[in-house]
Amino acid sequence: MKAALIFYSKTGRTKRIALRLKDLLSNAGLNVDIYEIRHRKEYLNKLLHLNPRLIMDTLLDKHVEFVGAEDFNPEGYDVIIIGSPIWYNTVVPAIKSFIKSFRDRMGSKPIVCFTTSTLNIDYSSKFKELLQSIGYKVILCKSFTTIEANRLINEFTNSIITKLKCMLSSTSGKKT
């Protein structure tokens, strides 16, 4: 099976989790391609959450230009995994713009989503609701609150693999 792992990471927390997921999924036999989405006009690191443009883009749900998905073709994947940090209780503008830009090309691809935050809040359920509201078929979601959560990453990876195996067996059962 082939997976696309798409994420945005400003501070590195989401990237570390995405790379760990890639390693674990690859070790389990999945072929995983990574796409790191960036804002075309990136926000400054200094006082990140006090940046007026970041606040406006996030709170007003503005479409922003992004880079990193130029070679992405959803038709080449069995599952799409999307990760985002949380800013002001929502996914980052680049990920929102990405999912809205690709919603017509994803079809009924199974989607797995995850979020990272310093708060112990289940933001991934909100991300799942957002994805489903625009037509995505989300099969699994997970919130990560600390980068030291290796056990949670391992459990999440196992859940992804189990879900994909079930989907694969039900698909092959229909063909016989």
Image (tube, rainbow, N blue to C red):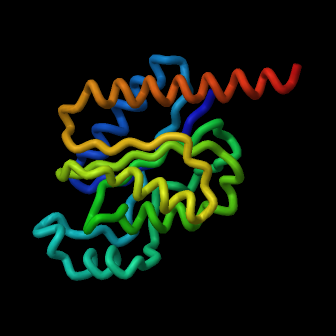
**Residue 161 point in image, percent of width and height:** 52, 25
- The one of 36 and 141 positioned closer to us in this rendering: 141
**Nearer the observer, 65 or 122:** 122
Residue visible at 35% across and 72% down in the picture? 41
From the top left corner, tell me how far across and down residue 162 is, in percent.
53, 23
Q: Residue at x 30, y 46 (%)?
A: 14
- Above or below residue 161? Residue 144 is below
Relative to residue 19, is residue 66 drawn left or right?
right
Question: In terms of image quadrants, where is residue 10?
Answer: bottom left
Say if 146 sits above or below 54 in the image. Answer: above
User: Residue 15's spot in the image, x, y percent?
Assistant: 31, 43
The quarter of the picture where the C terminus appears is top right
Compared to residue 27, the image places residue 57 above or below, namely below
Quarter of the figure with residue 171: top right
Q: Is residue 155 left or right of residue 46?
A: right
Q: Residue furthest left?
A: 47
Q: How many marks?
A: 0
Residue 49, compared with residue 11, is above or below; it is below
| Residue at (38% x, 42% y) in the render | 142
Q: Is residue 25 left or right of residue 56?
A: right
